[in-house]
Image (cartoon, rainbow, N blue to C red):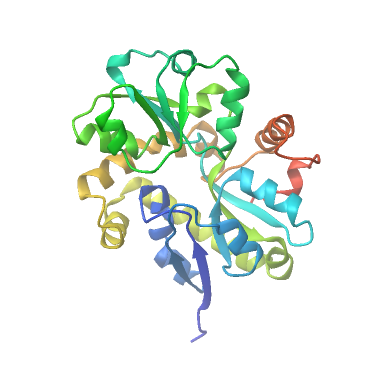
Amino acid sequence: MKSLVALLLALNWKAEPQFGGFYAAGEHFQKAGLQVQILEGGSGTPTVQMLVNGKTDYAIVSAEEILIANERNPKNRVLAVFAVYQTNPQMIMCHADKKFASLRDVYASTATLAQQSGLTYAQYLKNKYPKSRVRVVPYLGGITNFLADPNFCQQGFITSEPLAAEKAGAKVTPFLIAHEGFNPYTTVLAVREDTWRKDPDQVKRVVRAVRAGWNDYLKNPQPANQIMQGLNKSMDAETFRKSAEAQIILIRDNETEKKGLGLMTAERWTELIRQLRELKVLKKDVKAGDVFLSL
């Protein structure tokens, strides 16, 4: 019997439903002749650097990270091969009793907004709402400050922090950043370009297995949720279930129904490149076809 090819996949956060399809892909990896070890991440895990430096074979990154990494390391480029979310789940949540109708209202208020300064969408929103009155403070993780202060808004994922806050008794209003016109692909599976050149068959097998895993997870998240809950004790079974349910509409849409999960388009990448050039995050222009593969 032929031995399985051992590969490492680095996640950029703990085992949570945003990675459910990767954990559900175990059997599919094995059938494809692959033994994929999934390495959990945490706050600030530099997965794109790990990939560039050969510390991992595959990594979960954001679309922005791919573009920035390729500009900094043109001789050691990385490629996007599968995008989990069609609608970016990043959001800002506020207390419902503030009655904000949109992020325009939030930025016009004197609320406190906890946000990482380096986030690309933070720059985008700062440009979009230049006369902001909101008080921006560093995001320290968790929802403790949010629960303690009715004037507090914070960043997060729509599949995570709002559920945790509501479980703790708060009523929240989340605002998706994607609805503000900034919708980069995220939870993107990436590989080094040299791996693709040397062994395109392996990359195709990985992507096929991942797609099958995500199809399985969307149909029945329970088995993978049990695996992830064993790794991530901070999230209970009910929150795993609700989070998996909440993300379905962000992962599956009319286009993925026709063309398959993980879909990426040149139009979306071109728009992101234009936005990052406008924000001066990217110095050089890039062709969309140079950063992603349709497999």
Residue 218 placement, left or right of 240: right
Q: Residue at 49% of width from left, 53% of height from top?
A: 44
Q: In the image shown, does 246 or 170 lie closer to the viewer? A: 170
Regarding residue 292, the answer to whether it shows in the image is no
Regarding residue 52, the answer to whether it shows in the image is yes
Q: In the image shown, does 15 or 130 lie closer to the viewer? A: 130
Number of callouts: 0
Quarter of the image for residue 149 reads: top left
Furthest residue to the left? 169
Q: Residue at 50% of width from left, 79% of height from top?
A: 4
The image shows residue 192, relative to residue 19, as above or below, that is below
Picture coordinates of residue 266, whole percent (x, y): 70, 38
Q: Residue at 72% of width from left, 70% of height from top?
A: 198
Picture coordinates of residue 275, whole percent (x, y): 69, 30
Q: In the image shown, does 74 or 261 lie closer to the viewer? A: 74
Picture coordinates of residue 155, whole percent (x, y): 43, 34
Q: Residue at 45% of width from left, 37% of height from top?
A: 138
The image shows residue 231, relative to residue 66, as above or below, that is below
